[in-house]
Amino acid sequence: MTLKRVHIKGGNTVIARRLLAIGEHQPRRPTESKLVGRTWELTTVGGILDEAIAGSGCIVNIVGPAGIGKSRLVRETAALADGRGVPVFSTYCESHASDIPFHVVARMLRAPIGIDELDADSARTQLREWFPGADPEDLLLLGDLLGIRDPAVPLPDIAPDARRRRLTALVNASAMERPDAAVYVIEDAHWIDEISESMLAEFLAVVPQIPSLVLITYRPEYQGALSRMPGAQTIALRPLSDGHTLALTAELVGAGSATGELAAQIADRAAGNPFFVEEIVRDLAERGVLQGQPGAYQPRGDVGDVDVPATLQATIGARIDRLRAPAKRTLNAAAVIGTRFDADMLAALVSNVDVAPLIEAELVGQVRFAPNAEYAFRHPLIRTVAYESQLKSVRAHSHRRLAAAIEVHGSTDENAALIAEHLEAAGDLHAAFDWHMRAGTWSAFRDMRAAQTSWRRARRVADRLPHDDPDSLTTRIAPRTLLCAHAYRLGGSGADTGFEELRELCAAAGDRQSLAIGMSGLVTSQTMKAHRREASQLASELVQLLEAIGDPTLTVALSFSAMISKHETGEMADVLRFAQLVIDLAEGDPAKGRLITESPLTVATAKRGLARWCLGIAGWKDDFEQAITTARALLTDPGTLAGVMWFTYVYAIPYGVLLPGAAALRDTAEALSMAERSGDDLALDLARGIHGLALAYQEGPVRERGFELLAKMRDRAANDRMSLTTVPIADIHTAREKARTGDIGGSIELARTVVDDLLNSGGCIWTALAISVLVEALLQRGDDGDLDEAASAIDQLAAVPTDPGFVLNEISLLRLRALLAHARGEEAAYRDHRDRYRAMATSLGFEGHIKWAAASREEVRTCGATSRLSGRGRIRLAALPVR
């Protein structure tokens, strides 16, 4: 730290230090006692701090019940950091703001960037200086999160998940580049909002790689993401021992013999809670039971008759009751505002603000002096007691006035959730509902989980309306429709959508449109969770509903979800019918019905191509070419391009319809490049899977890259970030690769698992491929019983019910029966199946099967017409598909 001598008024010279930061942790209080009973804890944190400064960053969780000393340990650590010249940046969570999205994370980021004291223009300048060379779009996204975005500049049109990914990359990259040590504090994480929790967990992932210490305090009941950070150290604060409690009490009261009995009584009642000890002593001093100064009190009268409050809340309540009227009104108004409050907000609620007595009584403390004075409750329990002690009617009036003040003076959309909370607390249900819905709309472009939180709050408010309210049905339907429609955006988390309630309400209101919108989202969600049969049944119901409604645009928009569920179960006749319906109703307009996808017509064309080849109907190549050409023209929509590529290649390459040649590599690489530039997470997930699959069918080093991409796709699905229906794709190809590299046992074991799962779920489009891989591996090993197991697996595939003309299974069965007959030495049967297989592949124009059939024929010609297997049924790999 650089020291400098400066002259001040009066001719004196003093040493000045450069101000590095103003932390939000509360400063030491004048009457604060010595730290008692926490030597080990403070020594431990101090040691971790030194390691963090040296470059080994660490997260320390400080856990304990209210009043046990979590904040005190943070203050002591902050003092240690200050002594080492390390800045401390803090944020805090509040009980009344636990459903306000981005509430905590925005404060956590604003502090180290140094924009808390700046106006919006200056803050944006600071942001550009803090992140030099950053993408301007990323700075816009970050400015929006921090509440300093220029409203005249539109936000980039990207998916909410993409915002998170880009912000995480920006913040973490900046943290990695900064060599300066720092301490970050997140207090009361048990009240953190879900979105801040998720984003902070992503930001904190780089802590072990930077010279930083992160302190997170929370109560034992908290089990969220911040309590499970990898590598974090946890310090659980226990109640003080009897000896330490008595020592703390003696220090606060005084060590004289006259107070010894009272000190013992206080220590016994406090039960090891240091905050309770402090509050009891303050209560006794305010009542006049103790006279003098802290640490040197003298009792007045017989201490044996002293009434010590039984609970901490009773102690705080008694102290509040002794305040004069102006101070008490100020404290009550502050409790409505929150844990922290400023003079302007207080003035909006009370005419005669009187903060000084609150500071003197150490109920609150001043935490900021300029440009506007800001205060904070000394402990959350003080705020809770002050809030709950007020009459409900008084609280409601304050909440109503506060909501109006926030609306006038703040950013209305950004503060919509906070306004809604205050109006709900005031009992203004209609207004609260409107603001919750507004908050959901604002959040939907930023984080879908935040939007879902607001819609759930709106649903709760709507359900509180009287049944005879004329708006009851419409208000109850609206949030449920949005919850159901966007359920799939939360992956496989199984979020509560209330669909059955939506169905009942829509029936009562005769609102079929809302039911269809909600149902489409639920169909997609069920499909993504791999609930295949449930999704298929619901999809049939959705199409019937759309036909009954008779709205062409709505049908074009919502049929996509029905198609993806039906193709997953292999019901390709339905897929073909739905796709053709969309193509006819779209009337050549690629933008018609752009609700779920940017171009339903383009996606439906690709889906028709998929259904056509599965059913052996000509024209599928033309559909694919048309869909790809149109998707390429939609340069602003990587999602449509990735979707079209998915339906074109992901099924056709493994099933031998298209070869994984130069065209497939070029197209899938193009989709991946476009998705990476856009930041659309859904498009990126799809593009990774498509390109990974195309690479996995190549020879050489690129093959390994392909399996890396498939593994990433599987991990994303397993962690509810992508559809679970992609898991079999990755597992089937992993099983095939195990066989190729010699791990036949591992291949068979994995393939068996996939086959069992698919058959137990009622079968799906991937059943034929999974059984093919299992049969290939069994024939390759050729141990006792392997050929019988292969025959049984083939019979299982033959028993799977399919639509008439479903050639996908038919051609797979012909090929597998040829391989089995060849393995058994049944030459006549082999030739019959082989020739029928080759004829079918040729007639359908299936490029991969044609190549595989030719390879099989060449193998027989080379080995001789009467070739037999060597060993126990082993089959030469050359007779298997070239991969």
Image (spheres, rainbow, N blue to C red):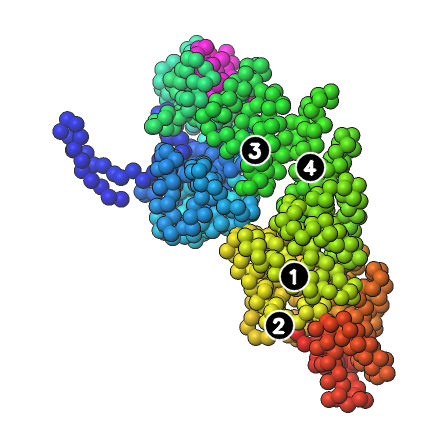
The disc label shown at residue 414, or none: none
Does the CB distance between marks 3 and 2 fall below 8 Å? no
SS class, disc 2:
loop
Residue type pointed to by label 3: Ala
Question: Residue 513, how many percent across, how many down?
Answer: 73, 37
Give the residue number, with chain letter if any, for mark 2. 661
Residue 589's spot in the image, x, y percent? 65, 50
Which segment is the magenta one?
305-334
Q: Mark 4 points at which residue?
A: 481
Q: Is mark 1 on a helix, strand or loop?
A: helix
Q: What residue type is labelled 2?
A: Gly
Q: Residue at x 66, y 38 (%)?
A: 483
Image: 559 above or below 38: below
Residue with the mark numbered 3: 439
Which quadrant holds residue 791?
A: bottom right
Callout 3 touching callout 4 (CB < 8 Å): no
Task: Say which label, 3 or 2, has the lower sequence index.
Answer: 3
Mark 1 or mark 3, which is nearer the start of the sequence? 3
Label 3, label 2: how far apart the Cα atoms are = 49 Å
Q: In this view, does 75 lie above or below 764?
A: above
- Return the residue at label 1: 626
- The residue lying toward the viewer, choosing from 258 and 437, is 437
Name the quarter where the C terminus is drawn.
bottom right
Q: How crowded is mark 2: few (under 14 residues within 10 Å), some or many (20 or more)?
A: few
Residue 549 magenta-highlighted:
no
Task: Note whether 572 is above or below 110 in the view shown.
Answer: below
